[in-house]
Image (tube, coloured by chain):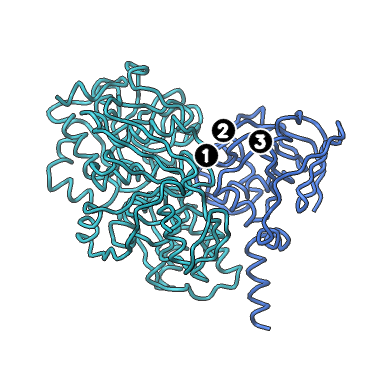
């Protein structure tokens, strides 16, 4: 699970109402949700959302509601990975459960510039800034979460487990 | 070993002493989903191969976020929830019953010492009864609906020791806003928070719900208050047996302890667009408002409506202001009607809407126009929260909301409460 892409930066405390307002929660479809994703940050920001981008956020990304539509909408935008100084707790669980790659690494967030090309190795938690050549070590995931990430989310993980139990 | 309240609950569940940082798999006592999150949970439930919920009486769906349905898309989601609930014979609270976080404790689903998960971030509200209650997303909810289990990282805990009597016109809402302002929106991320002290003991259970409700606004995983005689009386009224015995927590077990004397606290206000952007109300007194909103899982309870009615009795709201009132539940509405509170509010010019979340969460029932300013008794003032990113929301106590509705400007409720 290695991702390469250009960095798009956002600030701290990006909340779920900014990511996807409640009035759009009438669909689960990632593409339909993506049409309204980050509406709260304005059209100039939305114009910069390109498939394959790596979103870099400061502290407390995804704070607010428990709506899982938030990571789904981000995935729908084609964002390959979110790197933040820290994530709000429910968003963190939701992202892993639906298979949106996330990494926590405050040192990287502090130094990276918008537009830098970076490579992320998700399970090792290694981030390389391909422009500066500098590498960063993110907080590693506990083994239990690695299992869910490898399965591509909690639904697939649960399905595999049920299958194993049947055998 | 006594640890924190949080540690005591997890240790009792696991059957051995647990420490913060440990990942544990525990049985959950109750699970809840609402109409913003349950439909996606049903989808995940089916995709996971779920056939039957783990226990019919321990799963509830609440239709409150858009109730009654404002459009066809939402109606289809509601239908899906009802069909699932009837087929699975789980508990269903349909439109008009009220806001999930009022109903779940009110109907007796929460006990001290229990672990409750809800697919709604304000599930932490139930911690006011001494439960470990936390918000999760839809996929987690689905997994718990099938297995009755949930994995948790046992959190570190922050303690708030609060002493002193809140002055007249200053309420538990002002107190929690003040604390969020002090520790900021991510001051408790990944952590549990617990509240104790003479201030907390003096508060009613209703007022304690307001405190725990907003633990999430400092990033908290849960917000807990140890049960006391008031809690037990509240639970008894709802026929809930409180049989979990907490030990006096061990102060050294807390990661951090904050102490505040609140006896000189002024009314507080959270300024757009962040909940931790908190100031003494006086700084924003006189700011013009277009709409005032009284309700929500934070402050839509009987004593909230009661204090607003005390301020509004015999008065009219400002002619250029709308005052929208959403009682937190059908029960709260009925009690407020019996006490004459609803007549007072309506005679003063308030508009009554169905008990539910709509106005606060921006799905319907009071979306502000661009450039408009709202003062609200709710818990979030994020940009676009009430349905329009070009409006602004101030958060304050029900008393401040009522006083401001009269003046058409942000106003100090103490001028009405002598």
Check disc 1: other Cα within 10 Å, few if <14, some if 14-19, many if 20+: many
Check disc 3: other Cα within 10 Å, few if <14, some if 14-19, many if 20+: many
Q: What element carries label 3?
A: strand
Task: Say left or right for B274 vs B225.
Answer: right
Q: Mark 3 lies on which chain?
A: A
Q: Which circle's residue, 1 or 3, is located before the other in the chain?
A: 1
User: Marks 2 and 3, Cα distance to the nearest angstrom?
Assistant: 15 Å
**Residue B280 locus on image (x, y percent):** 36, 22
Nearest the eye: B32 or B159 = B159
**Residue B232 locus on image (x, y percent):** 23, 57
Note whether residue B96 is visible. Answer: no
Q: The blue chain is which one?
A: A
Q: Mark 1 lies on which chain?
A: A
User: Marks 1 and 2, Cα distance to the nearest angstrom?
Assistant: 7 Å
Which image quadrant for residue B381? top left
Quadrant of the snapshot with the N terminus of chain B: bottom left
Q: Is mark 1 on a helix, strand or loop?
A: helix
Residue identified by numbered label 3: A57
**Residue B64 locus on image (x, y percent):** 38, 52
Residue identified by numbered label 1: A17
- Answer above or below: position of B334 versus A108: below
- Residue shown at 15%/39% (left/top)? B343
Note whether residue B168 is visible. Answer: yes
Q: Which circle's residue, 1 or 2, is located before the other in the chain?
A: 1
Nearest the eye: B340 or B183 = B183
Q: What element carries label 2?
A: helix
Indicate the colour of chain B: cyan
Which image quadrant for residue A55? top right
Q: Name the disc covering residue A40, or none.
A: 2
The answer to whether marks 1 and 2 sit on the same chain is yes
- Answer above or below: position of A167 versus B364: below
Nearer to us: label 1 or label 3:
3
């Amino acid at each position: 699970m290695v991702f390469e892409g250009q960095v798009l930066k956002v600030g701290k405390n990006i909340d779920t109402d900014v990511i996807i307002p409640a009035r759009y929660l009438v669909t689960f479809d990632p593409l339909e949700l993506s049409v309204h994703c980050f509406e709260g940050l304005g059209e100039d920001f939305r114009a910069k959302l390109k498939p394959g981008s790596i979103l870099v956020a400061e502290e407390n990304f995804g704070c607010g509601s428990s709506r899982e539509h938030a990571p789904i909408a981000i995935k729908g935008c084609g964002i390959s990975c979110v790197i933040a100084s820290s994530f709000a707790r429910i968003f963190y669980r939701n992202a892993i459960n639906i298979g949106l790659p996330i990494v926590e690494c405050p040192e990287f967030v502090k130094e990276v510039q918008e537009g830098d090309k970076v490579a992320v190795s998700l399970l090792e938690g290694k981030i390389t800034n391909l422009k500066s050549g500098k590498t960063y070590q993110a907080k590693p995931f506990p083994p239990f979460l690695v299992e869910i990430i490898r399965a591509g989310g909690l639904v697939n993980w649960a399905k595999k487990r049920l299958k194993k139990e049947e055998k | 070993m006594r640890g924190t309240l949080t540690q005591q609950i997890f240790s009792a569940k696991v059957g051995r002493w647990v420490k913060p940082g440990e990942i544990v798999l525990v049985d959950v006592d109750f699970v809840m989903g609402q109409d913003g999150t349950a439909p996606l949970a049903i989808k995940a439930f089916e995709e996971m191969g779920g056939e039957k919920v783990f226990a019919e009486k321990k799963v509830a769906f609440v239709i409150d976020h858009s109730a009654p349905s404002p459009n066809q898309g939402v109606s289809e989601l509601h239908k899906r929830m009802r069909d699932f609930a009837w087929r699975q014979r789980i508990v269903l609270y349909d439109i008009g019953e009220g806001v999930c976080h009022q109903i779940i404790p009110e109907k007796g689903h929460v006990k001290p010492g229990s672990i409750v998960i809800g697919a709604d971030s304000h599930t932490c509200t139930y911690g006011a009864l001494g439960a470990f209650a936390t918000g999760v997303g839809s996929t987690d909810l689905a997994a718990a609906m099938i297995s009755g289990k949930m994995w948790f990282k046992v959190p570190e805990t922050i303690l708030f020791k609060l002493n002193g009597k809140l002055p007249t016109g200053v309420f538990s809402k002002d107190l929690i806003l003040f604390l969020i302002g002090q520790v900021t929106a991510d001051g408790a991320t990944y952590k549990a928070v617990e509240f104790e002290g003479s201030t907390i003991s003096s508060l009613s259970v209703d007022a304690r719900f307001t405190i725990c409700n907003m633990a999430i606004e400092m990033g908290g995983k849960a917000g807990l208050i140890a049960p006391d005689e008031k809690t037990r009386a509240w639970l008894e009224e709802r026929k809930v047996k409180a049989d979990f015995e907490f030990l006096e927590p061990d102060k050294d077990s807390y990661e951090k302890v904050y102490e505040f004397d609140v006896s000189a606290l002024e009314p507080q206000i959270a300024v757009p667009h962040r909940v931790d952007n908190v100031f003494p109300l006086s700084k924003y007194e006189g700011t013009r408002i277009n709409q005032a909103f009284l309700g929500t899982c934070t402050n839509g309870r009987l004593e909230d409506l009661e204090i607003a009615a005390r301020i509004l009795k015999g008065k009219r709201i400002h002619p250029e202001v709308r005052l929208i009132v959403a009682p937190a539940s059908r029960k709260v509405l009925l009690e407020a009607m019996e006490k004459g509170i609803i007549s007072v509010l309506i005679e003063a010019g308030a508009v009554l809407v169905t008990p539910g979340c709509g106005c606060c969460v921006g799905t319907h029932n009071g979306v502000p126009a661009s450039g408009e300013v709202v003062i609200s008794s709710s818990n979030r003032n994020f940009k676009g929260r009430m349905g329009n990113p070009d409006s602004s929301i101030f958060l304050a106590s029900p008393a401040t909301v009522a006083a401001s509705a009269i003046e058409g400007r942000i106003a100090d409720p103490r001028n009405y409460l002598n």
